[in-house]
Image (spheres, rainbow, N blue to C red):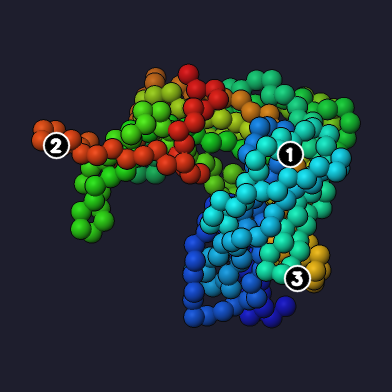
Amino acid sequence: MTAAGFKKLLYKSVGWCLVLMAGCITPYDGDVKEVPPGIVVQGFISNEEGPYTVRLTTAANYTYAGLNYAIENATVYITDNEGNRENLVHKGLGEYQTQTLRGQTGRTYQLHIEANGKRYQSRPETIRPVSKIDRVYDESYRIIDPNTRQDILGGWKVYIDTKDPAESGNYYRWSWKHYKQAVFCGSVNDRNGNPLYGLFCCNANCWDIVRCMGPNCINVANDALINGKNITRQEVAEVPVGCLDRYYIEIEQQALSRDAYVFWNTVKRMLQNTGGMFDVTPSAIPGNMTNVTNPDEDVFGYFGAIGVERVGYYVDRTGADRSECDMGMPYPPTGGIPPPCAPCAESLYRTAKRPGFWE
């Protein structure tokens, strides 16, 4: 492969990997066009209650700054192995959502898309049974401060214990997200866009969501070496030093298909590579979407069927010997006419829905 070809493939592969991780939809029209565009599919169905969301975008021609465009007004539907079909509703910004569909363990599902005169579909996937999480626990760890050379608290590692089923061929992915009750849902800014003070949430029940992002947050494994055995001390999260409080996280254990495991493991390796001389050469990540109309077209992304086990857990930071508490935006000024409140707008990073294990 030539140096120019290597660079194009690297930009393309790493670029849409970042799109899959962040769910970004940012129109961009750069002057330099590096590679042909392609459709990117993000979505899954699980044994948990819906609605399920499928995001459709067109991968822009990647340069250092290019991202992607939302695909609007497509026909999107999901079928199962019993002949059922549900059409997804277009919510805007390339998002399509189910209405009444509830995934069932053991049933097989397939995604279908009709957009821009083309037809796409995923390979059928079955929702696999998922093991229970038997135990969650955390341990603090210490680091050497690079400035003072003193031994200080570095944070907490969170582990789980679970049991691998007796049959071979089980594949796992672990993820987590942090919920914190929101104080402000907006801000009053100065003429340069810098926040002067926060605006309280109109809804008292509002939570900010911090999601684990980046290659280190793609945590996958298979049972090749542990088939039928207990899985102990499986690290699933790392909690930072922050305020002296209880840090709430939701841990998710997923049962994947082999194809989904290969996909996420390849994405992780791709994002970890930096283009050094000993890195693995970039390649097309093996998703499960194809263009039925034109099988030669590149289709990126993955539509999965996953079994999910979810637990909530609090890391108690109240007794820590140090803190790095960010107080956030200043409170509104007192006296005079109270400032307006701001709505708790639903997004990937904020919700008015009470977390399932919140105390």
Crowd rating for badge 3 (residues with CA inside 10 Å; few <14, some 14–19, many 20+): few
The amino acid type, in three-letter code, at marker 1 is Ile
The disc label shown at residue 337, or none = 2
Residue with the mark numbered 1: 306
The amino acid type, in three-letter code, at marker 3 is Glu
Crowd rating for badge 2 (residues with CA inside 10 Å; few <14, some 14–19, many 20+): few
Q: Position of residue 115 (x, y in %)?
A: 68, 64
The residues tagged by marks 2 and 1 sit, at their Cα atoms, a distance apart of 51 Å
Q: Position of residue 317 (x, y in %)?
A: 42, 24
Residue located at (10% from left, 35% from top): 336
The residues tagged by marks 3 and 1 sit, at their Cα atoms, a distance apart of 26 Å
Question: Height in image: 173 above or below 91?
Answer: above
Question: Height in image: 70 above or below 235?
Answer: below
Name, please, the residue furthest toward the left: 336
Q: Is residue 138 visible?
A: no
The disc label shown at residue 23, or none = none
